Image (cartoon, rainbow, N blue to C red):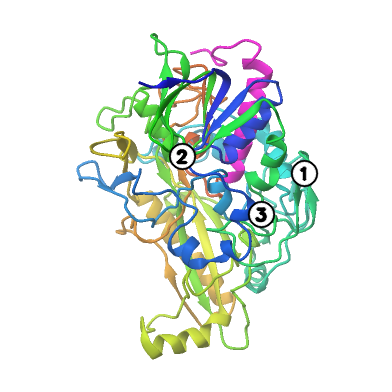
């Protein structure tokens, strides 16, 4: 029998970026707010202090900051006719856990979204006609505009102390910034980071090829900074430990460095760790959430009553909670009915290692997660897709994130995989190796979806979430197009040889090698309850006091890193809860 706790006004499931944002915004109204985190408590000190956090064995090899797959995981298959098997070893994607979530081990690349991507279906039809959309592609608009979100993009950037150079302020194109971006209201809070060698070579080469490179927006601080909450960041020292690691220097934006120090001072906020939420509870009508049920570290079960429930966990857990709580109809790919689990997408990345002669020093052991130069001539609808026969686009960048002996040392093609030959190749190439990448959007398809696995359950007795996904012809055509661009840029940078991964037609999703943690969709937002799970305010169409945050609300996978849009949507949802919902609880969009 579950123990019933004292009711709170708001219960938040998950305590990463979105949970921290929502907790701060709603606690400021005077509401009692409780966050439930399935992982452990963690903070810069002592958890990310030197030398503990720069242990490559613990963090990169043994995935110290990631979800424990022996307790709960997902099952994976390529096609609905395949049998799914559990994801038992961290490979293709890296779900976070603990206070701060994936906001601890992210790189720091902090982009917005192209305005046309939020109205993707309308834009494609306007420019190319409806017949250009493949019959198996589920293209739709998001139900929200860039102009509505702009103040919230700005708010999140100033929370994070984002380093960058504006390219479009109030419609005026600014030299040195991204000339393709949507209009922004003001400059970034900090100037760009200093370019490392890879980025210098990339910028020079792409300019000579006729592109317009600009500094990547990065939530790795280029200067000392104090944000609007009074939290302080120190300047990045390019240690090379961003992705997979917490920041030892208070330089990378995370919930711990930008929000939690202020949030913890609020008497009406509290949080509990090692609390795994099993389901969202509803009343007899199924139309009102009454709280959640969770299990603590000792296996004791509790009910937490609340007037508002917010799902702010990692993407996959948010989707599964909707399913196990029986909120909304699970998508059926055979009939096309249902919305929960629909529009499941996964971002593609083509990555090419560049090997230079011994006169070109890269020093790849130094870097930062977000530092680099980028071009966007092939992002979204910045180019003519007609001759290429695919929908979507992406960014091409020359980043230098830092590398070490455990995380992997690239070597040229033909190098032995062990022994003296491998050692000699490492010695000759380590200081002279860089990397360029294309990060691509991913559309939604009828045959790519999430549901509950009929066979496998986790340690809590809950059916595992089943992922059905594979690369489609549209994705692979796009990848081949970008592969050619990467090859031309690599040669222009002066590489003597290149190796890496460029997906081509016929390739399937390989779950063993890291691809990206940028998983999208499954509880898509939109204007039509027949094709979306939440409305434009991220409010459930079915349960009006339930709000669902995260990249799971994306209608398709964007070419950018998702964190900037995820944070902006969280601020947007919180602002509308404060201004509208609290004054008149109920559906904010008529059904």
Q: Is residue 518 magenta?
A: no
Instruction: Tell me whether the residue at label 3 lies in contact with that at label 2, contact meaning CB atoms closer than 8 angstroms.
Output: no
Residue under pointer 3: 252
| Comes first in the chain, label 3 or label 2 | 3
Compared to residue 144, the image places residue 173 above or below, namely: below
Instruction: Tell me whether the residue at label 1 lies in contact with that at label 3, contact meaning CB atoms closer than 8 angstroms.
Output: no
Q: Residues within 10 Å of mark 2 (few under 14, many from 20)?
A: many
Q: Secondary structure at mark 1?
A: loop
Compared to residue 73, the image places residue 537 above or below, namely: above
Segment colored magenta:
563-591
Residue under pointer 1: 227
Compared to residue 480, the image places residue 443 above or below, namely: above
Nearest the eye: 217 or 114: 217
Q: Secondary structure at mark 2?
A: helix
Residue 315: image tag: 2
Nearest the eye: 577 or 248: 248
| Comes first in the chain, label 2 or label 1 | 1
- Residue at 57% in and 25% down: 537
Q: Classify residue 133 as left or right of residue 115.
A: left
């Amino acid at each position: 029998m579950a123990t019933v706790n004292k009711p709170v006004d708001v219960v938040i499931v998950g305590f990463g970026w979105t949970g921290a944002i929502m907790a701060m915004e709603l606690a400021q109204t005077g509401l009692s707010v409780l966050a439930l985190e399935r992982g452990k408590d963690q903070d810069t000190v002592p958890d990310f202090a030197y030398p503990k956090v720069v242990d490559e064995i613990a963090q990169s090899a043994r995935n110290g900051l990631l979800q424990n797959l022996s307790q709960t995981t997902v099952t994976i298959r390529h096609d609905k006719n395949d049998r799914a098997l559990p994801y038992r070893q961290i490979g293709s994607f890296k779900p976070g856990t603990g206070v701060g979530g994936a906001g601890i081990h992210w790189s720091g690349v902090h982009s917005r979204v192209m305005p046309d991507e939020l109205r993707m279906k309308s834009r494609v039809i306007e420019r190319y006609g409806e017949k250009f959309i493949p019959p198996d592609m589920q293209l739709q608009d998001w139900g929200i505009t860039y102009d509505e979100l702009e103040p919230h993009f700005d708010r999140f950037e100033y929370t994070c102390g984002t380093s960058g150079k504006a390219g479009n302020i109030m419609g005026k194109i600014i030299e040195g910034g991204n000339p393709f971006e949507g209009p922004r209201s003001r400059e970034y809070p900090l100037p760009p980071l200093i370019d490392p060698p890879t980025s210098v070579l990339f910028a020079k080469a792409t300019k000579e090829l006729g592109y317009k490179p600009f500094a990547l927006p990065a939530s790795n601080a280029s200067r000392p900074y104090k944000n609007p909450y009074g939290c302080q960041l120190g300047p990045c020292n390019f240690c090379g430990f961003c992705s997979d690691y917490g920041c030892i220097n208070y330089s990378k934006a995370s919930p711990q460095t930008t929000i939690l120090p202020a949030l913890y001072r609020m008497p009406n906020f509290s949080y509990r760790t090692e609390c795994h939420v099993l389901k969202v509870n509803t009343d007899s009508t199924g139309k009102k959430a009454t709280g959640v049920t969770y299990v603590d570290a000792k296996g004791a079960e509790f009910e937490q009553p609340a007037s508002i429930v917010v799902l702010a966990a990692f993407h996959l857990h948010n989707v599964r909670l909707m399913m196990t709580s029986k909120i909304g109809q699970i998508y059926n790919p055979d009939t096309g009915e249902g919305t929960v689990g629909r529009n499941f997408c996964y971002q593609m990345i083509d990555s090419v290692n560049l090997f230079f002669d011994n006169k070109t020093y890269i020093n790849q052991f130094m870097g930062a997660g977000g530092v680099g130069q980028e071009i966007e001539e092939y992002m979204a609808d910045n180019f003519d897709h007609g001759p290429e026969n695919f929908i979507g686009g992406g960014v091409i960048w020359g980043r230098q994130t830092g590398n070490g002996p455990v995380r992997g040392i690239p070597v040229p093609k033909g190098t032995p995989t062990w022994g003296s030959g491998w050692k000699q190749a490492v010695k000759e190439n380590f200081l002279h190796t860089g990397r360029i990448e294309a990060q691509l959007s991913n559309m939604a398809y009828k045959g790519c979806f999430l549901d509950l696995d009929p066979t496998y359950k986790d340690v809590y007795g809950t059916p595992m979430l089943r992922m059905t996904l594979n690369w489609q012809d549209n994705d692979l055509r796009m990848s081949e197009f970008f592969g050619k661009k990467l090859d031309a840029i690599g040669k222009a940078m002066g590489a003597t040889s290149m190796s890496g991964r460029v997906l081509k037609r016929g390739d399937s999703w390989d779950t063993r090698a890291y691809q990206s943690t940028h998983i999208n969709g499954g509880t898509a937002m939109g204007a039509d309850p027949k094709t979306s799970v939440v409305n434009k305010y991220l409010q459930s169409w079915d349960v009006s006091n339930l709000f669902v945050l995260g990249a799971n609300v994306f209608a398709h996978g964007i070419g950018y890193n998702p964190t900037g849009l995820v944070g902006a949507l969280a601020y947007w949802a919180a602002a509308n809860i404060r201004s509208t919902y609290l004054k008149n609880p109920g559906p904010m969009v008529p059904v």
